[in-house]
Image (cartoon, rainbow, N blue to C red):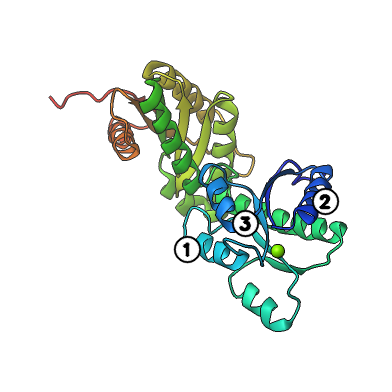
Amino acid sequence: MNKVSGKRILLVDDDRISLGFIAAYLRREGYEVDTSENGEIALEFLEENIPHLIICDVEMPVMGGKELRKSLRNNSKFRLIPFIFLSGKTDAHDIIEGLNLGVDDYVTKPVSHVELGARARATLERQALYEDLLNYDHLTGVLSRRNIESKLKDELVRVKRYGRPFSLIMVDIDHFKKINDRYGHLFGDLVLEKVAKNMSQKIRDVDYVGRMGGEEFVIGLPETPRQAAFEVAEKVRKSISEVTYEENPEVRVTISGGVSCAPDEGDQLNQLLEIADKKLYQAKGDGRNRIIDELTEPS
Ligand SMILES: [Mg+2]
């Protein structure tokens, strides 16, 4: 087993014999393999399925590989799927024309299954590395902003469909600028790391945390009403306030937070973030080191 086994490969080739042999080999290597016999059938398949890699013959009836590649490349939903051409056309002109379509590799037939498997694996491993870079915050290891926003949006689709509650907590480290100014940015980074680690440990298994930027984090809590989210937030807040830092033993770091809940307070991500942010702002105004789940009316 390798670390990309279980990944889904779409194999497109009009030569059924070659298609069958390659598919069987890749399945033995641990991949899930789907097959299509031309570009048009592949496009239909892609309407419902997003594979991790497409391996595609160039010359096929109805819709050839180059035409398929062009249409995928112009579609934001598909353009990041790794793509390998597999072609009987071996002269430099054809290879260059293929590579100019922004593909990851161009393999000429006949190719050994072992070599094609190795090229597929190399491409999948590189893609997995890029996805890690995009999906995780490099300093703290929690979800990247892009990744958590996408998860939150998916969650809100489920809220709309099934009406189950979903809560989020917006968290900000108190006086972070002062910590940086007094102890330096390296220590500031260490604080970010420790706070993020602590949050990840104190939330429940189903919850997740992402870094929005600077010293601001968001925690997503599926199937969770506001009161229960508040309790999770309080646990996190208390735990972070007790963390000690060997480098500067006198330092205690605290957080402030605001909780918002769908569908009660909205079902759009922007709305929920804005409401949580208002409550966070109130937590700061009320003296920090606290979580606000309900705004007090201005008197
Ligand atoms: Mg062909």
The x, y position of residue 121, in whole percent, is 77, 54
159 left or right, relative to 199: left
Give, as a three-letter code, the residue at label 3. Answer: Asn
Along the polypeptide, which appears first: circle 2 or circle 1?
2
Quadrant where the C terminus sits is top left
Q: Which residue is mark 3?
A: 38
Along the polypeptide, which appears first: circle 2 or circle 3?
2
30 left or right, relative to 153: right
Ligand 1 position by quadrant: bottom right
- Which residue is located at x 53 percent, y 33 percent? 208
Give, as a three-letter code, the residue at label 2. Answer: Phe
Along the polypeptide, which appears first: circle 1 or circle 3?
3
Q: Circle 3: is it few (<14), some (14-19), or many (20+) Cα within 10 Å? A: many
Whether residue 234 is situated above or below residue 147 in the rendered picture: above
Determine which quarter of the picture holds residue 18. Answer: bottom right
Q: Circle 1: is it few (<14), some (14-19), or many (20+) Cα within 10 Å? A: few
Viewer-proximal residue among 132 and 51: 51
Q: Which residue is mark 2?
A: 21
The x, y position of residue 286, in whole percent, is 29, 29
